[in-house]
Amino acid sequence: MDRERAIKAVEEFLKSFGEDITREGLVDTPRRVADAFAELLSGNGKNAEEYLSKTFESAGRELIIEKDIGFSSTCEHHLMPFFGTMAIAYIPDKRVVGISKLARTVEVFSKRLQIQERLTNQIAEEIMRCLKPIGVMVVCEAEHTCMTCRGVKKPGSKVLTYAVAGDFSKEKRDEVFNLLR
């Protein structure tokens, strides 16, 4: 990130709306916004393979689900947050990954400018590529502030997306949804 360039861009943005960037409450705002976006977009340039490459032997081939993985991301259409929870289900093929690594994978992809549909698919595809499980399913439920705070203004509305990769039968999908209820 070019921090100074980002700060200048925020200053210009605020000025374009008639704000006085020298007033007390706004003096440090451009720096704070630049630092905030550096954190919100910290997944750029990161690779989830770093987390998913450390696996452990497992004889089981039963469904593994990690649920209620909280996340926040930034909508690429409005630069506003969306946030919610993810559930990741996979059927291992002789190898499993540490449970924190799934949450770290969510962080890598959510800390980028995103749309929920792509985010859900990227996580499923990366887990499939790195872990090589029999199958994977990612379920994402999120509230989008671009819909709740502006535009249609429907607070509490949520979007549910899911992605499947590999051999994940309809029965297994139904099992995941039943277990998540």
Image (cartoon, helix red, strand yellow):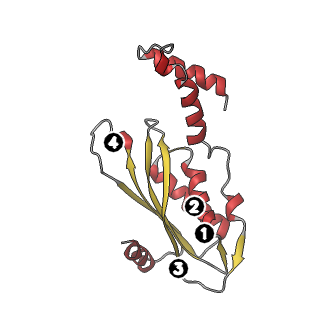
Question: In this picture, is 180 found above or below 113?
Answer: below
Q: Amino acid at mark 1?
A: Ile
Disc 3/disc 4 C-alpha distance (Å)? 35 Å
* Residue located at (65% from left, 57% from top): 48
Q: Residue shown at 41%/78% (left/top)?
A: 175
Marks 2 and 4, the one that precedes in the sequence: 2
Residue at image mark 2? 103
Residue at which label 4 appears = 147
Discs 2/3, front: 2
Task: Where is residue 140? Give x, y as percent.
Answer: 44, 59
Q: Residue at x 41, y 17 (%)?
A: 17
Relative horizontal placement of residue 8, taking residue 45 as reference (left or right) = left
In the foreground, 35 or 41: 35
Q: Residues within 10 Å of mark 2 (few under 14, many from 20)?
A: many
Q: Is residue 116 above or below residue 164?
A: above
> Are circles 2 and 4 on residues that touch, CB within 8 Å?
no
- Nearest the viewer among 94 and 81 is 81
Disc 1/disc 4 C-alpha distance (Å) = 32 Å
- Label 3 or label 4, whichever comes before in sequence order: 3
> Counting other residues with Cα less than 10 Å from the Cα at mark 4, is it few (<14), some (14-19), or many (20 or more)?
some
Q: Which residue is mark 1?
A: 99
Considering depth in this image, is 133 or 40 the residue closer to the camera? 40
Few, some or many residues within 10 Å of mark 3 (<14, 14–19, 20+): some
Q: Which residue type carries mark 3?
A: Leu
Residue named by callout 3:
63
Which mark is first along the chain, 1 or 3?
Answer: 3
CB under 8 Å between discs 2 and 1: yes
